[in-house]
Amino acid sequence: MKNLLIILSLFFIFSCQEKSESKKIAKSDTQEFVWEGANVYFLLTDRFNNGDVSNDLNFGRTQETGKLRGFEGGDIKGITQKIKEGYFTDLGINAIWMTPVVEQIHGGTDEGTGMSYGYHGYWAKDWTNIDPNYGTKEDLKELVDLAHKNGIRILLDAVINHTGPVTEKDPVWPSNWVRTEPQCEYSNYENTITCTLVKNLPDIRTESNENVELPPQLVAKWKAEGRYEQEAKELDAFFERTGHPKAPRFYIMKWLTDYIIEFGIDGYRVDTVKHTEEFVWQEFKQECDFAFEEFKRNNPDKVLDDTNFYLVGEVYNYAISHGKAFDFGDKKVNYFDNAFNSLINFEIKWNAKQMEANKVFKKYDSLLNTSLKGYGVLNYMTSHDDGQPFDKDRSQPYKTANMLLLTPGTSQVYYGDESARDLTIEGTVGDATLRSFMNWNDIHKNEDTNKVLHHWQKLGQFRANHMAVGAGRHQLISNDNGLVFSRVRNGDKVVIGLHLTNQNVTIDVSNLYEDGDQISDFYSNKVFEVNNGMLEITTDNDIFLLEKK
């Protein structure tokens, strides 16, 4: 009898889990999604979660490195594991941006930071292969498929500007592929583009239309791996279809768009955009769009919806206040038209420090609906290479969440923002301090960390449930008792209260809801009713997130 009860209990648990999972999938299938209101989670693949310890060491990468300058074990399986656990869903994440997973240089280099390997993914050796430290193509396929089943899109990171550094194990690419000098000066358009970013980072000749042969080291590598004929055959088919010259940039575009066709990724975050001619990104968009349509034709059962392929660019120091044009000093460039859906916004962290919340919200609402109408920005407070994050000592994790997740635009949560991961690691040099391993121990054991995480989860889920939060129109309701405002997108209407100074709040919602409507506070789970166009709210918190039941 006891065994029967145990079996019945397990059946009940698994049945509930299956119902819960199918409910999540059904909700994501019907819920509106637009990139302009998305909640993106950005992580360093090597620093998030180690799902497979057997792949931690490859290519003899055993030299002692500078602090946090070597591989730490994070991998694709580790991300998949956290999707399975519901970590991203609980955080309201509907897109994950992973640092590049392509095969990195095998050697290490020391450019004043201590010995460093390509743990971060931006030092490509072979764009056609996944670095074994991150996992396999089968691992990536599993991740994308599982993410999609949970309503989560996947962004990979595209690098066309440069190869990895030159080391004893990684020879320089041919001179008709790359330039190794001069080093960029960043004072005008030309010396930001026709140059190498930093010392020993060969720059792809993206301006060239000259036909070039494959680098001999790549040919030798593919032959040793038994796949040269297949890769060459695919390249021939690509160039025949497109009519592009066999120029360096088009080889790389072919290799990058293969990840769209093969795995069905939903977008690319594009690295070092302003260091490459703007026409390169217009060409890249065309190839990405073609590849995405081909994936959908080949895999109709895996198509999430009719959302287009997403391209977000890193134009270093671009600010939303610039509108569409980035100013090099001697030339202004529009990276949006015919190229990017969105650019990373380097301004919001300063806005959040210098302006009160409603002024920030109003400014972003205005710009996104005028000079940037039809496009978007990706807001962030912390990143992997910004040495001046909004809250480096992690003393304001609640304000960080409020300003990031409630400001109009797409939000980018940097891994550990939600858990106040330490950004001041002793012994590190430069941006390595921003790249420590995810602080899972704090999440598992620290009560204060979990209070912070709970706040991020509440705001993140509310944002994911209502595209109006990031992509709707902003309207001030009251600032008498903290800040109360609405966001409206089509029929989606929400009301948000911040910095409340009184536990009892009465607001006029007559232009949003009908008398008798039941309005739920997602933050406290309390329910209120609209009477005579007014809503009386009681809360023990300094925030409320109101939605119609």
Image (cartoon, rainbow, N blue to C red):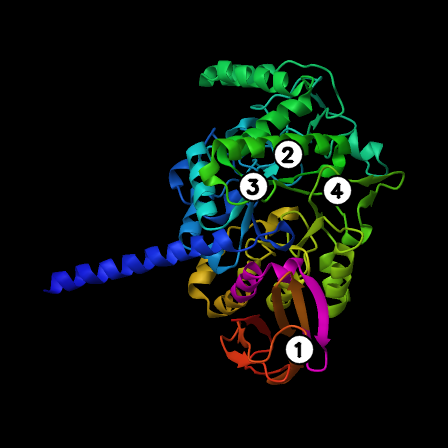
Q: How far apart are labels 3 and 2 at the CA level?
A: 16 Å
Describe the element under mark 1 as helix, strand or loop.
loop
Establish if 509 lies above or below 344.
below
Q: Amino acid at mark 1?
A: Ser
Q: Earlier in the sequence, mark 3 or mark 2?
A: 2
Q: CA distance from mark 4 to mark 1?
A: 39 Å
Amino acid type of disc 2? Val
Task: Give, as a single range, the part of the protein colored magenta.
Answer: 457-484
Give how far across and how far down residue 294 sits, in percent. Answer: 55, 30
Residue that carries the numbered disc 4 in the rendered image: 336
Q: Earlier in the sequence, mark 2 or mark 1?
A: 2
Q: To which residue does mark 1 refer?
A: 510
Q: Residue at x 77, y 65 (%)?
A: 354
Q: Residues within 10 Å of mark 1 (few under 14, many from 20)?
A: some
Please name whichever residue, 178 or 516, is drawn nearer the observer in this view of the structure: 516
Pointer 3 local density, CA inside 10 Å: few below 14, some 14–19, many at least 20: many
Between the residue at mark 3 and the residue at mark 4, the CA separation in whole angstroms equals 18 Å
Helix, strand or loop at label 4? It is: loop
Inspect this view and state whether residue 76 appears. no
User: Which residue position is annotated with label 3?
Assistant: 266
Q: Which mark is residue 159?
A: 2
